[in-house]
Image: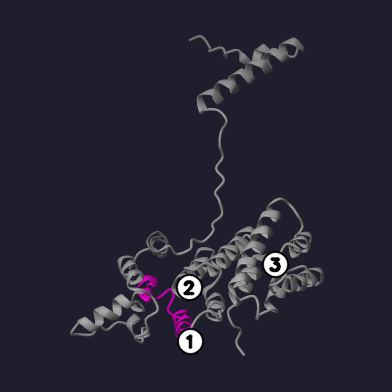
Amino acid sequence: MHPLPLDREEYIEQAYFFRVLRERIENGTPIQEILTGVREEILATTKLPMAIDFLIGELQLKGRIGEGMGRLPHYFTAFQTFIMKRAEDDRARLDFHIAVHILEREAKFRASQDMQAAALFIYQFECIARNRLGYDLGMVAVADDPYYSPAWKAWIRRVRFDLGTVDFASLVYLQSQLYQDLQQESSYQQHSVAEDISENSVLFSTSAGRIARANRGKDPLYLFAALQRQLGYPSVPRSKTVETVHPFPPQVEARFQRLEARLALVEQEQKGGLDLTKFYKPETPET
């Protein structure tokens, strides 16, 4: 029996849970203490408090919460479990703070009125692509999401084998309403390797198809950014680049260095340890 999507109030509480987890981790609070505290803050009419109780037990037993989420497939989706496990994997490159922020934003989007399968898929795919989490296991986890229809699930499982060989924007375009409309108006069929995977199923809107067609052959990140700007798709959290800010301009820094050198000479002279011979110019032999 496949799990069903949760009620909206569950995703609202999940978004709050992941936000509190992220903020309190940044303040240095231990995870077990965070889980124990936030469990009392969660709405009691939801199933999340019981899930948190289970996660606390898994954390005490194994020191990780990703495996605990995996044992609750009726509550946490496979994608949520995949993200958390990758964040807890010492060999992965996904920062734990970013992983929790990803789950927070995804839960918030699921609770919104603008929730749609196309936007959810693009968000999840960008999370996998941007953080280099691996398409094979990642796309399988995405396909197991109970929100997707059988057509979506079949396409996601099939398209993961074409990633890397077929342009991603083309994959989106071929499954859009725009492509289907143009095919119906056209008097001939275009044959290509990528076209065989479309199978006449419409998964993306006309607007998404137009944006995808304009980004064919480009970096997929440009496609994600355009969909976010034009259609309001949720953006993926990214780590902030910490820039080194110099307190003084380079000219002032150089003057400080010269002053420090002069002060060092004065201190040596006061201590009687100043050797002036090292400042003498070597004598040149007379010709």
Instruction: Pinpoint residue 34: horizontal percent, then vertical percent.
Output: 75, 60
User: Dot 1 corresponds to which residue?
Assistant: 150
Disc 1 + disc 3, Cβ < 8 Å = no
Distance CA(mark 1)–CA(mark 3): 32 Å
Along the viewing direction, whichever of 16 and 270 lies nearer the viewer = 16
Distance CA(mark 3)–CA(mark 2): 28 Å
Which quadrant of the view contains residue 201? bottom left
Amino acid at pointer 2: Phe
Disc 3 + disc 2, Cβ < 8 Å = no
Distance CA(mark 1)–CA(mark 2): 14 Å
Which is in the foreground here, disc 3 or disc 2? Answer: 3
Give, as a single range, the part of the protein colored magenta.
150-172
Which quadrant of the view contains residue 246? top right
- Secondary structure mostly seen in the magenta stretch: helix
Amino acid at pointer 1: Pro
User: Dot 2 corresponds to which residue?
Assistant: 121
Q: Is any part of residue 284 visible from this angle?
A: yes
Residue 106 part of the magenta-drawn span: no
Q: Earlier in the sequence, mark 3 or mark 2?
A: 3
Q: Earlier in the sequence, mark 1 or mark 3?
A: 3
Q: Is any part of residue 94 visible from this angle?
A: no
Which is in the foreground here, disc 1 or disc 3? Answer: 3
Instruction: Pinpoint residue 212: horizontal percent, then vertical percent.
Output: 34, 69
- Residue at image location 69% in from the left, 12% down from the top: 266
29 to the left or right of 265 = right
Amino acid at pointer 3: Leu
- Residue at image location 75% in from the left, 65% down from the top: 39
Q: Quadrant of the N terminus?
A: bottom right
Which quadrant of the view contains residue 180? bottom left
Q: Secondary structure at mark 2?
A: helix
Vertical placement of 210 versus 276: above or below? below
